[in-house]
Image (cartoon, rainbow, N blue to C red):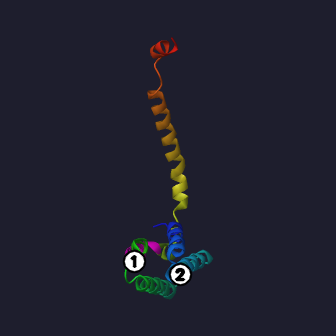
Amino acid sequence: MCNAHLLRDLKAGYKRTEQTWNQDMIAFLLLAKQQRECQDDPLNSMVVTWMDDTHLAILKKGYKQNTTLVNHNAEMLLNRLSKHQDSVLLFVENMDVPFDNNLAKRDLRMAKVKQKVSVHSEVKQMHRIPPWHEAFLVH
């Protein structure tokens, strides 16, 4: 789960609804990231437990602010954060897991761009007018 994308979704959710749980989750994720970056060793188990509990408390607040669940975007985001809590906070416990997957996306982006360029040039070649048609068009 990419926390950078979660942050983007939380910011957009706050702009739409101005519900405070979005801001709380943003602050929490950024604090967790900061704590992780300051440590060379795995975080203390008490800190990890506190982070799990805080994450759940913010989710509970979010569900409370969305009791009618009229806002489907907020509901989907809350469900995603709840269902994938272990993935969201995996970077806290595992030193090998980055906060976001932007590096992986950047690595794949050039391959995808090359693939699109290749397909585009193939399509362009397919739509070229054959030379024998050009003779009819000119006259």
Q: Residue furthest front?
A: 139
Residue 72 is drawn in which quadrant? bottom left
Q: Is residue 130 above or below residue 57?
A: above
**Which element carries disc 2, helix, strand or loop?**
loop
Q: Amino acid at mark 1?
A: Ser
User: Residue 62 at x, y = what percent?
Assistant: 44, 82
Q: How many marks?
A: 2
| Rendered location of residue 138, percent (x, y) | 52, 14
Near mark 2 (Cα within 10 A), the count class, few <14, some 14-19 or many ≥20, is some
The residue under label 2 is which amino acid type?
Leu
Which residue position is annotated with label 2? 43
Pointer 1 and pointer 2: residues touching (CB < 8 Å)? no
Residue at image coords 60%, 77%: 34
* Region in magenta: 79-88
Magenta part, dominant SS? helix
Label number found at residue 82: 1
Q: Is residue 80 left or right of residue 34?
A: left
- Crowding at dot 1, Cα within 10 Å, few <14 / some 14-19 / many 20+, comes out as some
Image vertical order of residue 132 relative to residue 35, above or below: above
Coordinates of residue 14 in the picture (x, y in percent): 53, 75
Residue 87: in magenta span: yes
Question: From the viewer's perspective, is 120 left or right of 35?
Answer: left
